[in-house]
Amino acid sequence: MSSKRPIRKVLVANRGEIAVRVLRTCREMGLSTVAVYSEADRGALHVRKADEAVHIGPSPARESYLVVDRIVAAARRTGADAVHPGYGFLSEKADLARALERAGITFIGPPPASMDAMGEKTTARRNVEAAGVPIVPGSPGPIADEAEARAFCDRIGYPVMIKAAAGGGGKGMKRCDRAEDLASLWQSARREAAGAFGDDRLYVEKFLERPRHVEIQVFCDDHGNGVSLGERECSVQRRHQKVIEESPSCILDERMRQAMGEVAVKAAKAVGYRGAGTVEFLVDATRSFYFLEMNTRIQVEHPVTEMLTGLDLVRMQIEVAQGERILPQEEVVRRGHAIEARVYAEDPARRFMPSPGKITYLRVPGGPGVRDDSGVYGGWVVPPYYDPMISKVIAWAPTRPQAIDRLLRALGEYTVHGITTNIPYLMAALEHPAFRSGDYDTGFCATYEKDLVSPPDPRFEQVALIAAAVSAYKRDHDEAEASAARGGEATAARSAWARLGRFRSLRGGTG
C-alpha cells in the first residue's frame, strides 16, 4: 500500500526522454527531484534537468540502472520519499517496489502483488481468464522444453508465437510457421529471453492472421475506482517493436471502444491494480478482441493519450501514489486525433544498425499541435549501451488526415547531424497508402519493407565502414583515458556542478 503522506521529493530511476518527461511534471508540481546516472550518462539531459544527481555505476545497465540496491541507496542518501521508475529497466520489477516498501519509500506504480499477477505473462493470462476476459488460445503456463512445445504446437496447429514468460516488448518473441523451424526458433527465443530478462522460460500462443494491436490505457486508485482513457493503435511494428502509435484506432467504433475499455478496467481490478497500466489486445479480422498482456507501468506512447484527453498521466500517477482519487469515467473527454512516431538513432538502410555517436547539430520541430519528448541535445554523445530511441514526436489535429500531415511536417523539420536516424523511414510509413487508408495490421512493416527502406548507396559503403571503425576506436580510446583519469587525479576534472555539491556518488562525497 502506498504512503498517504504527500510526496515531497522524487527520484527518477530511469534515463533518457522518459526521465526528462517525469522531471518536468515534478517541477510543475513543486517537487524536488533526483536523477540517477551511469558512467555513460554523466552529461545526459536528465542529469542536467534534476535538482540532484547520483552516480550509480558503470555504463552497462545490468551494473547500474538494473541494480535495485543502488536505486534504493540513492533514494535514502538524497532523502527522496518516492521513486518513479519510468518504463523499461526496473519499472515492472516487483523486487524494486518491495525494497522501497521496506525502506519506507513510496513506489509510484502498482502494488507488488499486482505486478506479480500481471508480470509473468502466463500468470496474467490465467488471472484475466478467470475474470472473464477473452484470451488468445495458448499454453496455460511456461513450457518445460522443446519436446513439450512441439507436442502442444501440434495440438493447436501452426502458425504459433513463441513468447518469453517473464517480459514483453518483443524480446524473446518468435513466430513459427512450420514444425521444421521450431527447434531453432525455440532455442533462439530462449537465449533472447535469458539475455533480456534473466529468465529463459517460454510459452506458446496461437498466431492470429492479420491481427491489429490495440491497447487500452487504464487508471485505478486505492479507493476502488478504475477508468479507461481510451485506446491506442500500435500495429505499425518492426520485429514486434512499436514504431508509430495513433488514437483513435481506425478499426474501433464507439460500441467496441466502450466494450474493450470495460474489459480492460475489469482485468486491472481483478488483480487489485493501482496507478497507470496498459491492457493490450489483439483484434482479428472479424473484430473479435483477445487479451495479450498488461504492462504494469506508464507506456512509451502515453503522450498520445495525453494529447487526446488533456490529462497529465505522470501527474495522475503521483497523485494516486499519495492516495488521491482519480477522475470519474464521465469526465474523461477525448477529442481529435493524435499520432506518435519514435525517432531512433539507427540506419534503416543498413538493417537498422544502431548509430551511436555525437550529435553535432540538432533542431527539433515545433508549431501548432506538435510535441517533442526528447532525451538528447546538440553536442550529446548517444551511447551504445541502451535502446537507441532518442525522442518521440507527437502530433494532434482535429482529424486523422490532418494529424498525419502535421506529423509529416514536423518530421520534415527535425534535423539531426552527426548520427543517422530513422526519420526517412517514419515519413515513408506515414505517407504509405496502406497507412493513409487505415487498413493495416501488425504485418505492415514487413509487408511493405521495400517501400519503406531505401537501399544504401554502394559508393558510400566503404566510407561508412571506415568511419564506423574510426569512431569505435576513438570511443574506446576516450573511455580508456577517462577511466585512467578517474583513477588518478579525477578531482581536478570535476565540473563546476560537482564542486557545488550537486552531484553525489553512492561511495560518498561528489562523483
Image (cartoon, grey):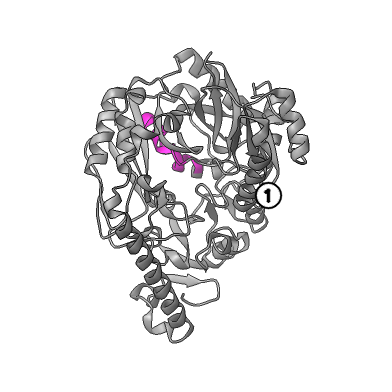
Q: Tell me if 455 is positioned left or right of 93 in this view.
A: left
Name the magenta segment's main secondary structure: helix
Q: Position of residue 327 (x, y in %)?
A: 48, 30
**Toward the viewer: 295 or 251?**
251
x 35%, y 49%: residue = 374
Q: Tell me if 68 is positioned left or right of 250 in this view.
A: right
What SS does tag 1 mark?
A: loop
x 50%, y 28%: residue = 213
x 42%, y 54%: residue = 16
User: On screen, 167 above or below 475?
Assistant: above
User: On screen, 8 above or below 337?
Assistant: below
Q: Which image quarter holds the N terminus?
A: top right
User: On screen, 218 above or below 288?
Assistant: below
Q: Is residue 308 magenta?
A: yes
Q: Position of residue 207 (x, y in %)?
A: 60, 26
**Toward the viewer: 28 or 366?**
366
Residue 30 seen from this side: no
**Toward the viewer: 353 or 388?**
353
Q: Tell me if 372 is positioned left or right of 473 in this view.
A: left
Residue 378 seen from this side: yes
Number of marks in the rendered image: 1
Q: Is residue 323 magenta?
A: no
x 77%, y 41%: residue = 144
Q: Position of residue 490 (x, y in %)?
A: 43, 82
* Magenta highlight range: 300-317
Where is mark 1, residue-wise?
199
For label 1, the crowd category at 10 Å Cα-Cα, with few meaning under 14, some 14 to 19 and many 20 or more, is some
Q: Amino acid at mark 1?
A: Asp
Q: Position of residue 104 (x, y in %)?
A: 63, 56
